Image: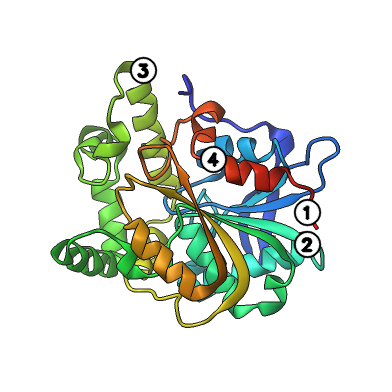
Amino acid sequence: MRKEFPRIPEDYVMPLNMNGLKGRMLRMPPPKNKKREVLLVYGHHSSLERMYSFAQVINDYAGVTMPDLPGFGGMDSFYKINEKPDLNTMADYVASIVRLRFKNKKFTIAGISYGFIVVTRMLQRYPDIAKQVDDLVSVVGFAHHEDFIFSSTRKTLYRAGTKFFSHKVPAVLFRNIFLQPIILRALYSKTHNAKHKFEGLEGQERQILTDFEVYLWRINDLRTHMATNHSFLVFDNCRQKIDVHVWHISVKADNYFDSHVVEQHMRVIFSGFTDCPSTVKKHMPNVIAGKKEAARIMPRPIRQLLNKQPS
């Protein structure tokens, strides 16, 4: 586990300006004698720093490109240009990144959790991009709102709450009252969804994790956070096939998804499916996990896949 706030070497971070939205993009060149290039799309409540350790793991096998998503990682939100951060706009944005970064070249995609459903929607909307993909990796991804293991009552409350706070005025009030650092530090670790993140952590590690969670809540756009939360509680990506094989990293003890239901939905969407169980005990490593901890989520079949020279 890291003993300090996650930091990325400046040489790996470049400015990103897409349709007037300013953010950043991580670019890590491939190791010597490696040709594979991976587009890494991070998940919800995230940033480049949050997923840098995982990018380091992939960089052992390939070059890595990881852009900010609008509204996350400190990037401007879609609301700045009068757009909504729904699945289609997020998918179109990632497609623009592909056009910018890969053009007509073959590349691999790894989508993490929410990032995977954005990638799926992009491949459905842009079949020409799907033809560029040599390998597709789902990192604890999902495919349908019914994949969640939440009770019906909990789902209903989440849908109503996220819908309400995705509006401008409630979001401003929520941010200015409940997302003040002093409030977050006092209460966040006690919330239902955060308890598993803090499990087993004490002292300095717990303090660093708390500080980083405060940082994420403050840099990420709250309206985007709530709107995207709502979108994955109601979405359905099973309405269109994609002629791509997916390699899915699953977690047996995932605290969010039913792995069997996820598999059934992915088999509906993709032309092929390979389940690659991970030995980790959580949906994803903690936000302060270093490279060693992040590597544990990568099962051997995925390592072997990435280590092959792309066709």
Tag 1–tag 2 contact (CB < 8 Å): yes
Whether 203 is drawn above or below 112: the answer is above
For mark 4, what is the residue? 298
Query: Mark 3 belongs to which amino acid?
Result: Gln
Residue receiving disc 3: 204
Q: Where's residue 18, x and y in %? A: 66, 64
Amino acid of disc 4: Met
For the image, the number of numbered tags is 4
Name the residue nearer the viewer: 174 or 147: 147
Q: Is residue 167 visible?
A: no
Residue at left offset 34%, top offset 31%: 210
Colouring mode (rainbow / by chain / secondary structure / one colour): rainbow
Which numbered dot is residue 106?
2
Earlier residue among tags 3 and 2: 2
Q: State whether residue 72 appears in this view.
A: yes
**Residue in view at x 37 percent, y 30 percent:** 209
Residue under label 1? 310
Q: What residue type is labelled 1?
A: Pro
Residue type at tag 2? Lys
State the separation of the CA atoms marked 2 and 4.
22 Å
Which of discs 3 and 1 lies nearer the camera? The answer is 1
Which residue is pictured at 75% across the width and 46% down the height?
308
